[in-house]
Amino acid sequence: MNYAEEPLVFTCADETLVGILSAPASDATTGVVIVVGGPQYRAGSHRQFVRLARTLASAGHAALRFDYRGMGDSSGNARDFLNVTQDIRAAIEALQRRLPTVSKIVLWGLCDGASAALLYCRETQDQRIAGLCLVNPWVRSEASLARTQVKHYYAQRLMQREFWLKLMSGKVAAAALSGLVRSIRLSAGSAGSAGSAASAGAIASNASFQQRMAEAWHSFQGSILLLLSGDDYTAKEFVEYAQTDTTWSAALKQAKVVQHVLDDADHTFSDHAARTRVEDLTRNWLDAQVHPTRNPAGLALAP
């Protein structure tokens, strides 16, 4: 084992936060702060954050996974992804205090952890952030969910003979038909309705969190790794949103974005092969994009 792990206990707004730091044997210059998503703690689903942190530390990158206030072993009241900017800042500062050689910070987030990472960048303009790894970002709204359901669920159901047999026999519940009609109406009325493309300072402070995420994405100067699960409605919903909402215009085509779709992976990469793939892609991206001295020839990322 060429890394060591230790607990980090630090404060945030008079509360105590708990994290686990995985540090390489040699001095690290890049530190990855793993921003958890949803109501979970620092280990992650299927211990995926434990595995990720250890893989990155073995490759020479420090990694800190931690609990927000009110989650896991941290004190305070629970909060959602819209209100964890102070927690993320406290984690970054704790990592750098413990490892002063770390000058570049990467935020790695799954689901609304990815959303929180973007919102952190918008709210703080933190110049220490050299890269963002965003995994199945959360952009859920009533309209975006409707678009995704119509395109990826109802469209398939309408092509199935079984559906029409059930419909003709009266076995399709009225609630199901009502849901289909409602989703179609929401989907048809929502595309491209969010306004002009995002730019620095262009979005009001009372804008939706999706619009604020878009502004952060467009203005971020570092590299972005976007990982999407092929078998996940959250990932599909994000792609739909980015392609149809004008505040996200051309976001996925920017040169700073490296994108990979893991075709058979579910939302939390519960399959061992999928988790390993995420770890490899993250490590390769860090070496090639965020820490290019580890890849002096500028080699392309493995597909």
Image: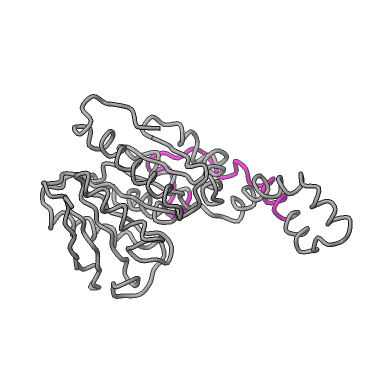
Total numbered circles: 0
Q: Position of residue 197 (x, y in %)?
A: 49, 37
Judge from the rendering whether residue 229 lies leftward or rightward of residue 50; answer left or right: right
Nearest the eye: 263 or 185: 263
**Colour mode of the rendering:** one colour
User: Could you tell me which residue is drawn at 33 percent across and 71 percent down?
Assistant: 72
Q: Residue furthest right?
A: 169
Judge from the rendering whether residue 237 lies leftward or rightward of residue 101; answer left or right: right
Q: In what quadrant of the picture does the C terminus appear?
A: top left
Quarter-wise, where is residue 201 in the image?
top left
User: Could you tell me which residue is drawn at 33 percent across and 63 percent down?
Assistant: 43
Query: Is residue 289 inside the magenta stretch?
Result: no
User: Could you tell me which residue is drawn at 89 percent across and 59 percent down?
Assistant: 169
Q: Residue furthest top?
A: 297
Judge from the rendering whether residue 33 lies leftward or rightward of residue 257; answer left or right: left
Nearest the eye: 35 or 162: 162
- In the picture shown, does residue 150 fall above or below 294? below
User: Could you tell me which residue is drawn at 29 percent across and 75 percent down?
Assistant: 75
- In the picture shown, does residue 192 fall above or below 185? above
Q: Position of residue 276 (x, y in %)?
A: 37, 47
> Which secondary structure class fits the magenta region best?
loop
Magenta residues, as a range? 182-210
Q: Position of residue 49 (x, y in %)?
A: 33, 57
Q: Residue furthest bottom?
A: 76
Nearest the eye: 240 or 18: 18
Q: Position of residue 29 (x, y in %)?
A: 16, 44
